[in-house]
Amino acid sequence: MSATNVEQHEVRGMVTDNTKNDQKRDLKLSGQVVGSLPDSTSAQAHESMSMTIEPYQAGADEAYMNKEQRDHFKKILLQWKKNLMEEADRTVTDMKDEANHFPDPTDRATQEEEFSLKLRTRDRERKLIKKIDEALQAIQDEEYGYCEVCGIEIGIQRLEARPTATQCIDCKTLAEIKERQRSR
């Protein structure tokens, strides 16, 4: 990593060194909206995965969701799942290594809060892994890439941004509007 690619960012009171690829995630953590990735750990996994897999470039006369496209998204989903599973394994190991019995109640409470946060994050990732598995099954069934509501193509760009998407942008937008109306 060259010195020109490293900048320091303050994220919720903590200073961390990050490459330019991590800056989007850090801006999101500091409260600024950047991109549409689900949460910080999923964003990290998706970011690292997308850095190694080039976006699909469809040809002008190429059929939608042909074998090559399905293989591309299968590769993305499998890499994302692998990254999430590795992170879960690291969390278990870290929690075992960090399990100290602090005599000070404040230190104990801080550690318990950190563990709780890690466990909530892993629970969200467990749900994401379930969505990834569903997307992989849809690829196998040759149903991947089509809206589950209206049946039209979701689109390569949307699937690149959110490989687990099951609805086209129009149906998803409508569902979000209805959800906001119900919550009022």
Image (cartoon, rainbow, N blue to C red):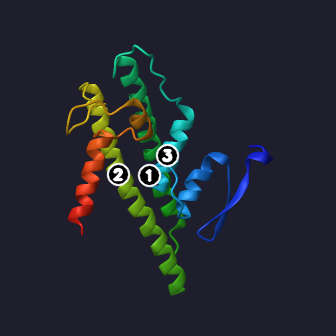
- Screen quadrant of the C terminus: bottom left
Judge from the rendering whether residue 9 lies leftward or rightward of residue 68; answer left or right: right
Residue at left offset 40%, top offset 62%: 119
Say above or below: 33 vs 74.
Answer: below
Which residue is under mark 2? 126
Q: Amino acid at mark 2?
A: Arg
Residue at left offset 73%, top offset 54%: 7
Say above or below: 71 vs 174.
Answer: above
Circles 2 and 3: CB distance less than 8 Å?
Answer: no
**Which circle's residue, 2 or 1, is located before the other in the chain?**
1
Secondary structure of the residue carrying numbered label 3:
helix
User: How far apart, in angstroms, are the residues tagged by discs 1 and 3?
Assistant: 11 Å
**Which circle's residue, 2 or 3, is located before the other in the chain?**
3
Indicate the quadrant where residue 60 lies.
top left
Which label belongs to residue 88? 1
Q: Position of residue 110 (x, y in %)?
A: 51, 77
Circles 2 and 1: CB distance less than 8 Å?
Answer: yes
- Screen quadrant of the N terminus: top right
Residue at left offset 50%, top offset 52%: 90
